[in-house]
Image (cartoon, rainbow, N blue to C red):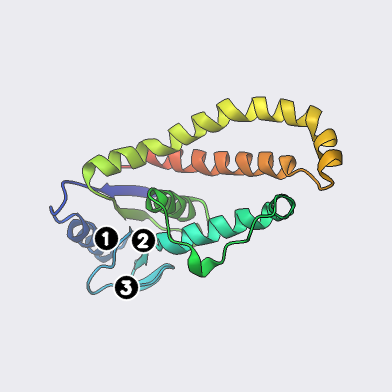
Amino acid sequence: MRTVLVTGPGGAGRTTVAAATALAAARDGARTLLISADPIPGFPDATAPTPVTAGLRSVRIDSGAHFRGELLALQEQLSSVLELLGGNPLDGEELTELPGSGELALLHALRRAAHGDWSAEAYDLLVVDLPPLRDALRLLALPEQLRRYLRRLLPQERQAARALRPMLAQLAGVPMPAQWLYEAAARHDAELAQVQALIEDRTTT
């Protein structure tokens, strides 16, 4: 699958160029998926790949829904610890996305398009409507940066947790979340590696 990343100065018509590129590719017979963070006039405003024309599907990233889903899932995994500490669970309705959540949602969408459930459609071309140039450059560097942080932190935490986990669990009276934390970190590292491979692939322009 070939990937085309569309960016440029703010107000330069990036979304228009991305949509035109996707439409032209579909007309030439390429099975194409267009990913955008914003609604595109004349395209379905859907958060799952939806047919536009023959050979073309589009999807709009819902960064708010992605943020809420990730945070609520983390809260569920930490429920025993939060209860021990007297924490009050958050409701999805009261959550508002934080700065940077849009970038993480876009990376998640790229992974789904290349290796996740969206890839089942077997696309020939992936067209991505990126943010303005400066933000896009930071976004494209994010997978490598996050993986570096995980690799640096994980070995130390794993070694300490293995020795302290039984004692901490006995003192607290609840299971420590160490194991799932390491498993989650490994899963996120693998997902970030997939996105990084997509960005660095020779067929990505």
Q: CA distance from mark 1 to mark 3?
A: 10 Å
Q: Which residue is mark 3?
A: 52
- The x and y percentages for residue 68 are 51, 61
- The x and y percentages for residue 22 are 26, 60
Q: Do the numbered discs 1 and 2 sit on residues whose CB atoms are within 8 Å?
A: yes
Above or below — where is 45 with respect to 72? below
Q: Residue shown at 21%/59% (left/top)?
A: 15
Mark found first going from the N terminus, 1 or 2? 1
Q: CA distance from mark 1 to mark 2?
A: 7 Å
Q: Quadrant of the C terminus?
A: top left
Q: Which residue is mark 2?
A: 33
Whether residue 201 is visible here, answered yes or no, is no
- In depth, the one of 175 and 129 nearer the eye is 175
Binning the other alpha carbons within 10 Å of mark 3 as few (below 14), some (14 to 19) or many (20 upward) gives some
Q: Do the numbered discs 1 and 3 sit on residues whose CB atoms are within 8 Å?
A: yes
- In depth, the one of 80 and 84 nearer the eye is 84
- The x and y percentages for residue 137 are 29, 38
